[in-house]
Image (tube, rainbow, N blue to C red):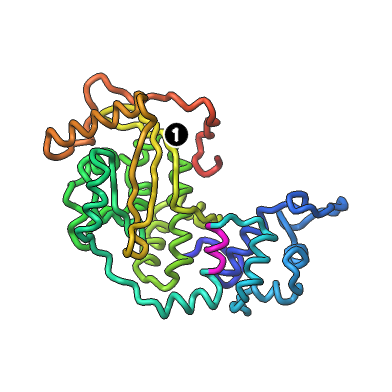
């Protein structure tokens, strides 16, 4: 499942990948002109920064010691400059975290009346309910129109046949075109969220199967998966190039659903009074007036815009090298 050769355990692989991405200067260590055989920090330097012995840290990376204390994990997180999402992921990969996850029985993912009420409370704003593995559990009409108008709107209700957002990002041509020049960032976010899910649910066979499928089906996914980056479910900004309403600059807000472990509601908004907000309103009107969505065919005379936000650099052509 893992497209990497670093370490011999998920914990060791994560530590090794993060260590390789931190320079001595970033953590206040002096360099004396010696040539480094590997990028980033040496194992001894991480051990020094975290206040643990070098042999112990080596055992952690090699996978021969998994039961690090929460205090040691927090020290390692500080030494490597991990953000909050990465710190939680590190704890989840430890032996103690994995044992807690094994003891926890995960409930079946079902859309309840309360979840539908929550989604309906956002009116015509595009909204999607996502499960632990990024499966689409439900969407409103505008959410379907924005993200996957080329798919059957009833597909989330069919067991085993519902859309998965990570699968769409990497294996669906419509979704790649939908994100246009922002696809590389969307791809990294999708992979980072699956990485976080693996740390939270390490023994989920369906999650492992999805990652294996994407690794075999997409070179880009395999390369990004090997980076071991973790992303939080919170807030993301993209420019989407919708085939019906053209370019829209959106914020995708993700929030946990109460009493529904791992299920999140994603709601899309645009700046008030902006052309993007008008485009989303038009999309909502079209979806509701039709009673369904036919989002794969562009309107006559509408072409995707190449307009970019002024504060965002233009990515390079290769999405993996950005």
User: Where does residue 125 sit, x and y in percent of width and height?
Assistant: 28, 39
User: Where does residue 229 sit, x and y in percent of width and height?
Assistant: 54, 55
Q: Name the residue at 19% across, 58% down.
A: 113
| The C terminus: image quadrant | top right
Task: Say if residue 61 shows up in the picture.
Answer: no
Q: Identify whether 146 is placed above or below 305.
A: below
Number of residues whose C-alpha sits closer than 10 Å to that of mark 1, classed few (under 14), some (14–19) or many (20 or more): many
From the viewer's side, name the closer residue of 203 and 80. Answer: 80
User: Where does residue 134 sit, x and y in percent of width and height?
Assistant: 35, 56
Q: Secondary structure at mark 1?
A: helix
Image quarter for residue 41? bottom right
Image quarter for residue 87? bottom right
Furthest-right residue in view? 32
The residue carrying mark 1 is 181
Q: Viewed as shown, does residue 159 lie left or right of 81?
A: left
* Residue stretch rendered in magenta on the structure: 85-91
Q: Name the residue at 40% across, 63% down.
A: 212
Does the magenta portion include 87?
yes
Q: Identify whether 142 is placed above or below 67.
A: above
Is most of the magenta stretch helix, strand or loop?
A: helix
Q: Viewed as shown, does residue 202 lie left or right of 6?
A: left
Q: Name the residue at 64% across, 62% down.
A: 77
Does the magenta portion include 133?
no
Q: Viewed as shown, does residue 242 lie left or right of 201?
A: left
From the viewer's side, name the closer residue of 272 and 10. Answer: 272
Task: Say if residue 33 shows up in the picture.
Answer: yes
Furthest-top residue in view? 301
Q: Identify whether 228 is placed above or below 297.
A: below
| The N terminus: image quadrant | bottom left
């Amino acid at each position: 499942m893992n497209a990497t050769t670093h370490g011999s355990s998920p914990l060791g692989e994560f530590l090794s990948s993060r260590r390789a991405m931190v320079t001595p200067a970033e953590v206040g260590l002096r360099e004396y002109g010696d040539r480094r055989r590997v990028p980033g920090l040496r194992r001894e330097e991480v051990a020094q920064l975290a206040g643990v012995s070098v042999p112990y840290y080596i055992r952690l990376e090699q996978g021969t010691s998994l039961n690090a204390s929460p205090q040691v994990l927090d020290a390692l997180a500080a030494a490597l400059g991990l953000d909050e999402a990465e710190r939680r992921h590190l704890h989840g990969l430890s032996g103690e975290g994995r044992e807690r996850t094994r003891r926890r029985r995960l409930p079946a993912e079902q859309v309840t009346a309360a979840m539908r009420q929550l989604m309906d409370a956002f009116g015509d704003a595009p909204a999607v309910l996502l499960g632990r593995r990024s499966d689409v559990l439900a969407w409103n009409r505008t959410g379907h129109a924005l993200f996957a108008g080329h798919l059957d709107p009833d597909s989330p209700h069919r067991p085993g046949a519902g859309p998965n957002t990570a699968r769409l990002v990497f294996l669906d041509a419509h979704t790649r075109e939908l994100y246009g020049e922002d696809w590389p960032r969307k791809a990294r976010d999708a992979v980072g969220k699956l990485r976080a899910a693996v740390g939270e649910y390490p023994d989920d066979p369906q999650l492992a199967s999805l990652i294996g499928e994407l690794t075999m089906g997409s070179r880009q996914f395999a390369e990004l998966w090997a980076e071991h980056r973790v992303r939080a479910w919170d807030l993301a900004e993209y420019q989407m190039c919708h085939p019906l309403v053209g370019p829209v600059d959106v914020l995708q807000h993700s929030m946990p659903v109460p009493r529904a472990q791992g299920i999140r509601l994603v709601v899309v908004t645009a700046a008030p009074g902006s052309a993007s907000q008008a485009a989303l309103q038009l999309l909502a009107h079209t979806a509701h007036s039709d009673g369904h969505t036919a989002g794969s065919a562009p309107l006559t005379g509408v072409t995707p815009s190449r307009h970019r936000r002024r504060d965002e650099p233009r990515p390079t052509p290769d999405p993996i090298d950005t």
